[in-house]
């Protein structure tokens, strides 16, 4: 339970900063949405890897040790994303912004360019993990290293989107 | 960021017609920010968007967009 409360606490503070920035600048709904994705992934999986890191540093664990934490983190991330995206959409709508228009060509180009960065990170992580398996990397390390590669890839993808939204593409 | 040597008179023409960025954006089905970045030369629009912008403003595309130094 404290696990969930800690994540909610961190997410609340990060989202406060995002919503403040949204109110102070002319941030579009898509940019706000990318901020929400970035911060919620950072909060949930930052905490997940803190828990995993502590357990691994204490000594060897069984193969399914982190399964519950992992499933919990994924469910929490999905719930957080749904709730925060709805809040952002309603907030944007109240502020007179547009949330219904389909992605235009600039926004599609931003997503494509950002995806390229994320893909490179995920691919690099997969290649590194595949190589490490050959050297006898334990199963729980393999699984968490792959999760880390995907999480890092997503953070880089959303980070790149935010940079492109600000400096142009 | 993107400087392909393409310049435009979008801001002047839009202002002359009394349109806001949001109104023009709605006419050509893009976001207001996209109009803003095209006006500032940060984003180079596709041919189809350039044609849609010209049509929405009642101009020929070459009257609205031109290469640097022309």
Image (cartoon, rainbow, N blue to C red):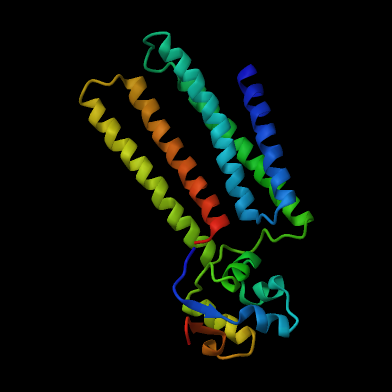
Which of A59/B8 is in front? B8
View extreme (left): residue: A134
For the N terminus of chain A, the image quarter is top right
Looking at the image, residue A113 lies above or below residue A14: below
Position of A4 compared to A129: left or right? right
Q: Residue at x 27, y 21 (%)?
A: A137
The residue that appears at 52% across and 30% down in the rendered structure is A45
Residue A85 location in percent, x, y?
A: 65, 46
Q: Residue furthest top?
A: A59
User: Can you give x and y, in whole percent of width and height, for residue A111 in the image?
Assistant: 48, 56
Q: Nearer the viewer, residue B68 or A163?
A: B68
Front-most of B8 and A52? B8
- A43 left or right of A134 in image: right
Q: Is residue A108 above or below residue A66?
A: below
Q: For residue A1, say whether it is visible.
A: no
Looking at the image, residue A141 lies above or below residue A80: above
Residue at the front extreme, as displayed: B69
Residue B27, quarter of picture: bottom right
Picture layout, residue A49 above or below residue A159:
above
Q: Looking at the image, can residue A100 be seen?
A: yes
**Which residue occupies 59% across, 38% down?**
A39
Count up the numbered dots. Answer: 0
Q: Residue at x 74, y 50 (%)?
A: A24
Residue A54: image location, x then y, percent: 47, 14
Q: Is residue B7 left or right of residue B56?
A: left
Q: Quadrant of residue A12?
A: top right
């Amino acid at each position: 339970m404290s696990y969930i409360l800690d994540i909610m606490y961190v997410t609340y503070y990060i989202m406060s900063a995002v919503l403040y920035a949204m109110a102070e600048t002319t941030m579009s709904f898509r940019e706000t949405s990318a901020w929400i994705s970035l911060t919620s992934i950072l909060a949930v999986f930052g905490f997940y890897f803190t828990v995993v890191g502590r357990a691994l540093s204490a000594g060897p664990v069984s193969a399914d040790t982190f399964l519950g934490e992992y499933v919990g983190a994924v469910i929490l991330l999905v719930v957080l994303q749904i709730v925060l995206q709805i809040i952002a959409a309603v907030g944007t709508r109240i502020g007179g912004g547009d949330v219904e228009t389909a992605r235009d060509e600039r926004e599609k180009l931003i997503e494509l360019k950002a995806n390229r960065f994320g893909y490179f990170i995920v691919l690099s992580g997969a290649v590194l993990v595949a190589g490490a398996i050959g050297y006898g990397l334990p199963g729980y390390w393999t699984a968490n290293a792959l999760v880390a590669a995907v999480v890092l890839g997503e953070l880089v993808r959303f980070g790149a989107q935010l940079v492109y939204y600000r400096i142009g593409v | 960021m993107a400087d392909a040597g393409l310049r435009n008179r979008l801001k002047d023409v839009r202002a002359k017609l009394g349109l806001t960025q949001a109104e023009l954006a709605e006419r050509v089905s893009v976001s207001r920010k996209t109009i803003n970045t095209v006006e500032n030369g940060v984003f180079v629009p596709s041919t189809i968007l350039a044609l849609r912008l010209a049509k929405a403003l009642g101009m020929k595309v070459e009257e609205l967009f031109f290469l640097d130094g022309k």
